[in-house]
Image: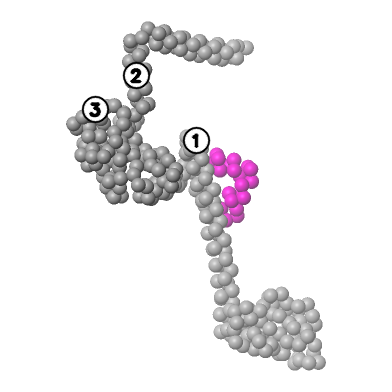
Amino acid sequence: MPKEDVEFDNNESSEVDSDLEEADIEWLIYDGSRNLMFCSLCQSHKKQNKFEKEGSKNFKSSALSEHSTTKDHTDATNREIAKVELIKVINNAIDRLKITLVLMKIIFWLAENDISLNKLPEVGILCRIFDCPQLLSAYNTITNENSVSGREILSAISNSIEEIIWKELAEAAAFGIMVDESTDISCEPHLIIYVKYCLYGNIKICFLKLIQLKSKDSKTIFDAIVDLFDKKGLTNKLMSFASDGASVMLGRSTGVASRLKERNECLFITHCIAHRTALAYNSAEKKWIFANMLNMLLELTLNKIQQQFLDYDDDERLP
């Protein structure tokens, strides 16, 4: 608390030291109406001593020095220091939380728009250019604006979204899955799984998981699907299955769909309409002359457009 700017009244008090009148003691309070001195720290922390309630009329510097060494005053001082440090730590934690939330939004936006996480530092710089308050804070001494931290944050976001989907599947009466197998650039087989379910009258279709497979045979795929839903106790709610028309998936005796139907006789099996359309187009192309002519026309049009762009680039390079 600030000290009142008043002169000491020597008529109602003991002798005043000359150095006390010029002293600047932060915790000292002078009540001019009562001609008493108080300690703001002892008052703030409710210490039971003369400087807290009664006030002191001893205006000698030795009295203040003696009070500053007492247990009450020392304890009050330490508590005040701890209070200031605690406020600083809390503000720092809140600030870091705001920074993390902003980065999570940026990373989620990058992932949604298929932009590489290597661009995260540049996007962070762009936010600072536009004076984003959370990224300009004085507490932002340690930064997570790099692709490694970006991948970790994106993984955390992914796990959070997956947990929400699992909770909704547990609440839903039934659900179906759409699956497809693929091979990545390192020749590792994967199985992508989408789920479709109805919750509170709203039909939802969500990406659930990308599972790495040991092989691409029907038993391995079947075991991967069953193991995934058995861990959550939801296999009995699996009521529909959709995939491409490969024998591994829809084979009559040993396909993935047939194996799942052995677990659930009510399973509804569907050949993916997109794959069926692609197969129909391939068949039509082989049999119909019109389809071949249409394909040739499209290729000629594409080649013509590409050639125009190449000619335009050549003209731009001319001196």
**Relative to 286, 217 lies left or right:** left
The residue that label 3 is drawn on is 247
Q: Disc 1 residue type? A: Asn
Q: Nearer the viewer, mark 3 or mark 2?
A: 2
Q: In which quarter of the image is the C terminus?
A: top right
The residue that label 2 is drawn on is 280
**Relative to 37, 104 lies left or right:** left
Q: Disc 3 residue type? A: Ser
Q: Quadrant of residue 242?
A: top left
Q: Quadrant of residue 74?
A: bottom right
Q: Is 224 placed above or below 51 here?
A: above
Identify the element where label 3 is drawn. Answer: helix
Front residue of this view, candidates 271 and 152? 271
Start-end of magenta stretch:
120-140
Residue drawn at (24%, 27%) of the image? 247
Q: Do the residues labelled 1 and 3 touch (CB within 8 Å)?
A: no
* Cα distance in 3D space between marks 3 and 2: 17 Å
Identify the element where label 1 is drawn. Answer: loop
